[in-house]
Amino acid sequence: MTTVAEWVEGARPRTLPAAIAPVLVGSGVAAWAGSFRWGAALLALVVALAVQVGVNYANDYSDGVRGTDDDRVGPRRLVGSGLAAPSAVRSAALLAFGIAGVAGLALAITTSWWLLLVGAVAIAAAWTYTGGPSPYGYRGLGEASVFLFFGLVAVIGTTYVQTERWVGAALVGGVAIGALACAILVVNNLRDIPTDAAAGKRTLAVVLGDLRTRQLYLALLVVALAGVALLAVVATRWALLGLGALPLAVASARAVLGGARGPALVPVLRDTGRLELVLAALLALGLAVG
């Protein structure tokens, strides 16, 4: 029997800041635009969290049945370690996606029906990241998908369901948050370069190699901080509160550029998620105040 603690571990809670952060920033932009709505914000959060958990279980299932997780450096996977049957993990992923779909339907009913199409594309992208006959995560496209769906789509979508109009500041916020969401995936894949390469999983980190992957990580942090500075120009100077996360960015960058590898990158993965969450919270506060 798989325990509750093992199911929670399989949901990979350290990745959840990537779901919470865009909702915080999108809601901050909505508040700055004078249209913050609690109900819509909470539904957007449910969608984001459910999709993230669904992605994690779907990856666990797909990588597990392919044998990619047979030799892992990071936290245990349910299928790869034999803790849960593949069918059970697949069902957990589908349940999470179903919850996201129900919450998304509620948002579409109260705003615009075209949101259902966006949600369907997001869920399809989540499943085919490592699932299906030709997973794009095995071809170096994972970061592009994360930037799109956990950055641009999530921030702009969260703002839209509250304001029901285009707000340019949401695009800038989406770029900043998308860069940090990508940074989480980059450091995860940096850690797994040896095992992924051996398993034939050509992530962007495998394609770029160790050094250039570390440089990409630094570049993503710079893009995120630059986005905060730009929001101070296009929205409100209070957005500069987001730069309060700078010490966390410096600490994570030092670890990556200092050559941390293997198990030593596990804390960096946690700290990058913390960086995204803190930056998003401070940025959202600044936007709301402004």
Image (spheres, rainbow, N blue to C red):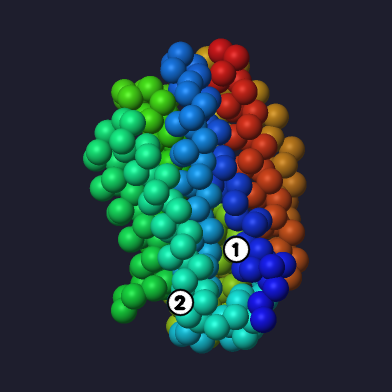
Q: Quadrant of the N terminus?
A: bottom right
Numbered label attached to residue 11: 1
Looking at the picture, how far across and down is residue 115, in whole percent? 30, 41
* Residue at left offset 43%, top offset 51%: 100
Looking at the picture, how far across and down is residue 210, in whole percent? 58, 68
Element under label 2? helix
Q: Quadrant of the C terminus?
A: top right
Element under label 1? loop
Residue 213's quadrant in the figure?
bottom right
- Regarding residue 50, the answer to whether it shows in the image is yes
From the image, tell me which residue sits under label 2. Answer: 62
Numbered label attached to residue 238: none
Q: Nearer the viewer, residue 109 or 230?
A: 109
Residue type beneath disc 2: Ser
* Residue at left offset 55%, top offset 33%: 24
Graded by Cα atoms within 10 Å as few (under 14), some (14 to 19) or many (20 or more), the crowding at tag 2 reads: many
The answer to whether 78 is drawn above or below residue 97 in the figure is below
Residue type beneath disc 1: Ala
- Regarding residue 212, the answer to whether it shows in the image is no
Question: Foreground mark, 2 or 1?
Answer: 1
The answer to whether 45 is drawn above or below residue 264 in the figure is above
Whether residue 107 sits left or right of residue 290 in the image: it is left
The answer to whether 107 is drawn above or below residue 273 in the figure is above
Residue 284's quadrant in the figure?
top right
Q: Nearer the viewer, residue 1 or 271?
A: 1
Q: Earlier in the sequence, mark 2 or mark 1?
A: 1
Whether residue 64 sits left or right of residue 168 in the image: it is right
Looking at the picture, how far across and down is residue 5, in whole percent? 72, 67
What number of labels is visible?
2
Residue 278's quadrant in the figure?
top right
* Residue at left offset 74%, top offset 38%: 247
